[in-house]
Image (cartoon, rainbow, N blue to C red):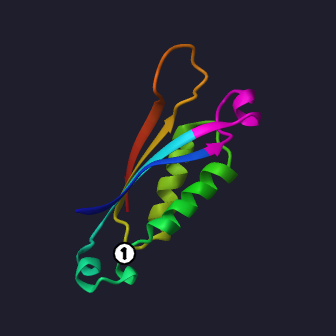
Amino acid sequence: MDKIIMHNMYFYGYHGVLEAEKTIGQKFIVDVEIMLDLESAGKSDSVENTISYADVYDDIKYLVESERFNLIEALSERIASNILSRYSLAKEVLVRLKKPEAPVKGIFDYFAVEIRRKK
């Protein structure tokens, strides 16, 4: 299966269980892979036969920056369901959501969840 890959999209949002996360906010990094058939887009060279990654980016930006969730699992689920419901060509989606500023005492790059959903 072909895929559109969107990696390391940075957004600022207000997601988390702690009150400070909900009021101060923090950075989130999103990776998305959308599985679909790109053969007709490749042969026709027409944007009508693919999914606009600019549109997907705008959708993800809106969800991360405008909506609020306690869990990154819930935000990831929302992103995946949005892509699958809004874009008919999408057959499957992988969402990896990284939280590099999680309120955990320790040294780490990030904590993350990764989900894969199919139509």
Where is the N terminus found, in terms of image quarters?
bottom left
- In front of the other: 44 or 59: 44
At horizontal 47% and vertical 62% (from top left) the residue drawn is 83
Q: What is the x, y in percent for residue 3?
A: 30, 61
What range is drawn magenta here?
12-27
- In front here: 119 or 31? 31
Please give the name of the residue rendered at 55% of the width and 38% of the height, measured from the top-left corner: 72
| Residue at horizontal 23 percent and vertical 76 percent from the top | 39
Work out whether 63 lies above or below 18: below
User: What is the crowding at mark 1: few (fewer than 14 residues within 10 Å), some, or many (at least 20)?
Assistant: many
Which part of the image, by quadrant, shows the C terminus? bottom left
Horizontal arrangement in the rendering, residue 13 relative to residue 83 (left or right): right
Query: Whole-percent x and y of residue 108?
Result: 46, 21
Give the structural element (helix, strand or loop) at label 1: loop
Q: Is residue 86 above or below residue 6?
A: below
The residue type indicated by label 1 comes to Thr
Q: How many marks?
A: 1
Q: Residue at x 52, y 60 (%)?
A: 57
- Residue lying at the far top in this picture: please name it: 106
Rendered location of residue 56, percent (x, y): 49, 64
Asked whether 58 falls inside the magenta stretch, the response is no
Above or below, 40 against 27 in this view is: below
Q: Which residue is mark 1?
A: 50
101 to the left or right of 56: right
Residue 16's x, y, as percent? 64, 33
**Residue 47's image quarter?**
bottom left
